[in-house]
Amino acid sequence: MRYNCGPRGFAFAGTMLIASMALLLPREIPAANTSGELPSEENYFFDIPVVLNVSRLAQPKSAAPAAVTVIDREMIRASGARKIADVFRLVPGFLVGYNHGFQPVVAYHGLSDSFSRRMQVLVDGRSVYTAIIGGVLWMSLPLSMEDIDRIEVIRGSNTAAYGSNAFMGVINIITLHTSQTQDTALNLAVGDHHVRDGFARHSWKSDDGEMRLSVSYQEDDGFDNLPDTQKVPIAVFRGDFRLNSTDTLEAQIGANNNEYAAGHPGKRPGHQDNITDPPRDAEVWSHFQQFHWRRTLSSSEEISLQFYHTYQKKDDDFVTAPFDLTGIGLGIVRIPIELDVVDERYDLEFQHTLSPRQDWRVVWGAGARLDRAWSQTYFDTSKTLENNVYRLFGNVEWRASWNAIVNVGTMLEDNGIGGMDFLPRLSYSQHLSSTDTVRVVASKATRSPTLFEEKSNFRLYFQGMPLERESFSPGGLTPERMTSYELGYLGWFFERRVAVDVRLFRDQIRNLITEIEIPDNTLDGLTFSFRNEGAVDLAGAEFQLEYRHGRNTRLFFGYAHMRTSARGISRQASFTAGDHEDSVPSNTTSALLAQRLLDSWWISTAYYRVPKLFWLGEGDPVIGYSRVDMRLARQYRRGGKNWELALVIQNLGSPYADFDNEARFDRRTFATVGLKY
Amino acid sequence: MCPESLLPWYGRGLRPPALVLRGWLMLLALYMPTPALSESVDVVIVVSSYSKIYVALASRVESGLPYSRKRYMRTIDVAAVDDLKLPDVIVAVGLKATQAVANRFDVPVISTLIPRSSFEEIARQRQGKNFRASFSAVYLDQPLGRQLDLIRLALPGRKRIGVVFGPQSRALSEAIHSESRSRNLTLQTVMVNNEVGLRLALEPLLLESDVLLSLPDPAVFNSSTISSVLFTSYRIGVPVVGFSPAYVRAGAMVAVHSSPEQFADQVLDMLSGFARESRALPPPQYPNRFSVIVNPDVARALDLVLDATVLERRLSMMENAP
């Protein structure tokens, strides 16, 4: 969470006084002497740069103005997940679906097609959703799962802090700081479905910083009856440098080259002809550069400046199966189609965290983003489209009394497509005791149209002749709007071994951007478009329980119950109001249990259950499924190295489909070997 | 109102604005009248270097000594020891200063800002040379019992204390085990030799501990390992007890420590005894004046509320209790 600020009044003064005494510490004392000589006072008085500063310290959950699910490394490992997207099955209210092996969709509270565009997804503060379609290419992230420290999922709209894409929620993936990975690590996985994974990480230090290079490779052949083999090499470099006693610089550079086989092998009932989706090879090349400079002005004040650049290029050219165009005098031809896309982003953000008065913590900042997109086919132009987004945000946390906290936050966003928006959030948390907290939140959110929704002009040509218009956006869309109310409860029981998180919510979405079909005299008789129409009301409850018993037992249980009603969707829409309601499952259930046995064995099992739902867009109706995964691991030390061997079996039950009936997930088994030293 | 204003006046030695109550109280502690010597005793203070800490300590001692016609410069550094004309008593500040004078001059020496184990080693060497004059100290280390009491006061109910021993700190192992036992606390310990050993052993230790107590040892806690220690312990949710203000500022939750001025006052106490008696110094002792420092941000992030003044008061009361 962003809202982390200084301490209160007198404690602050005392700390400042002591901190100022730190000025007495001799800067010229050399590094503490090492063993062999007598211990000296230098072992006590050496200078230490601030490590846990205000922005690194999380607001305690009991003070946060939102419901947060934290998935840490232990949970990721215990879940046995091989792909990052699968980890989100654990979070209450989340859905994960695979259209095919290489492109999962992660959606919160449904209402999604194969690209969930109502969630902000960040990796170390870097936004990774694509500007064109608004979704995330999960398998093209330059990120290795082994480098993830934790994932913070904010359930509930967070546009006040994260901007208009954080409509339903925010996923914040945080990688390990280099000082946490001062090691060399190796990992291999081998399994059926041609699973061949490898990971290697090496770290090194200089006088002023630590660095690491992680290289990984993932390969598997996807679903049985689909040509969706995938090979993903990834490389990421990260360095954390201490520029001086107050300044640090985090630098990251990474790349991912996802080569995959796409397409469907034959005609599928209920789908468009696979003319435009034949089996073929495609590739997404993505890379990023990111720099984050922070200056600690005092123990409670910090400024930071972050710049990043992300680039994604999809190469997807193919020729269709023979197509009968004799009707227009062209005979039976194979049509060459290019679905190449380039999606690029530049972002600069300044943030200031401080405590101007006792009991007040303030975070404010400003940012500018430039999104650039190019796709000859989707936009019918060789020009690069651009969109500028400017934002100004702030949040004030006020400790009104020892047990009441008020958070007032807002974002002012000027989006080239959506216009200017003011997105406020107000929350009030009351500690009923040292172990119970009640929270009330009200907020307004907007979702700006994506470049595709606003400017699509998806045309197919053959030998220069216009053939088909798939999609055309007249433009002029206005942002979707949502008003949300939330009542939350957090409690600890049994000497803090059990943590309970309950969230009741009511979201009212208006001015929905809906896909519509316009009949015309194109080849297939219709063209897709987008229009603002429709209203959706979502209400429900989310429940999360976590239990820890020392180091040996860990239990996570999540459950969400959702009710939807949709209206105002015209007959031209591709999907009816009923379809929209069906796209939100009535409930989701997840559980993860990890148990240590006999000191070095770990056994864990995960359970996920999703009842029937209907995916908008390309998906099929899902009849409801449950899945049980198991993992058995052994850890031991040998020769100064930490080893871990594990066996993972995914889906002990019967095969299921979570998005597309052709992509049926059967049982997967693989073994991993890991080494750290 | 904003406490940033504390910094300028502190440097000028002026009184603070009355607004900042706790800061003022702490300041009072610094400016309290120093114990005076009734007799004129010739004291020379030898500092390990002219770095700020040593100078602060030395000037405070000087300000507590009565004017002496015998000495123009009371404070000298190690380099000037060769030309020293023997005084009645030498105050050696730091390890280097102690090494420079203790085994060279058979005069009473009070050593300060020196870890106990080093002092005892030098004392052994001095005895080996058959020096008869008194050799005492105000140790740099806080007594283990005080640190454990601090943990008991700040984190009641948390009984498992994690400790990482390095090559220099492992000498304290037996002492800390017995102090913990008598306070009904359980120690989880691990011995490492270097940074690599620390990295591998830290996380398993933290998962078994309620709090991590840091004992200074350059192989274990130095400016580059501390980052990793603080990150890891914070991630796991285990508070760290530090040993210096810099450590607390960096992210340790709490520490008990003594400032150069507090050491100086205790040295003056010891000297006042010297003047009255026959050149005998009191035995070596742990610091009796101390402060508790808290990092309120870290405490809050770990869902704890700690009040440094209250902890300090209660800790003093515990020690003064019969």
Image (cartoon, grey):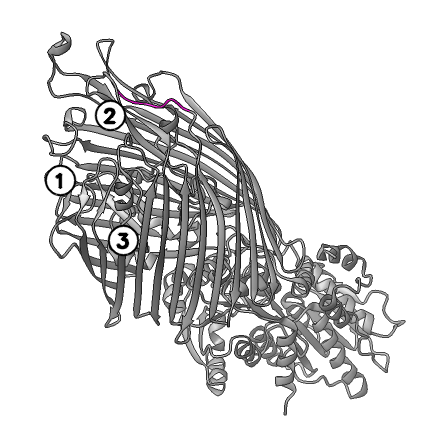
Residue for badge 2: A316
Among the two numbered marks 2 and 1 on one chain, the one whose residue lies closer to the N terminus? 2
Report if residue A527 lies within the magenta region. Answer: no
Residue at point 58%, 79% (across, down): B146
Mark 1: which secondary structure? loop
State the separation of the CA atoms marked 2 and 1: 22 Å
Mark 3: which secondary structure? loop
Which amino acid is tagged 3? Answer: Ser
Residue for badge 1: A662
Which image quadrant for residue A357?
bottom right
- Horizontal relation, residue A329 to residue B135: left or right: left
Which image quadrant for residue B130?
bottom right
> What chain is tagged by disc 1?
A
Task: Report the magenta residues as a range.
Answer: A469-475
A573 shown above or below A602: above
Which residue occupies the foreground of this view, A327 or B296?
A327
Label 1 CA crowd tier, 10 Å (few <14, some 14–19, many 20+): some
* Quadrant holding the C terminus of chain B: bottom right
Residue for badge 3: A586
State which mark lies toward you, 1 or 3.
Answer: 3
Residue at point 75%, 72% (across, down): B29
Image location (x, y in percent) of residue A485: 45, 53
- Horizontal relation, residue A400 to residue A592: left or right: right
Report if residue A472 lies within the magenta region. Answer: yes
Among the two numbered marks 1 and 3 on one chain, the one whose residue lies closer to the N terminus? 3
Residue at point 44%, 72% (across, down): B210
Q: Work out which residue is located at the far right of the displayed protein and give it.
A: B69
Residues marked 3 and 2 touching at CB (< 8 Å): no
> What chain is tagged by disc 3?
A
> What chain is tagged by disc 2?
A
Which residue occupies the foreground of this view, B58 or B119?
B58
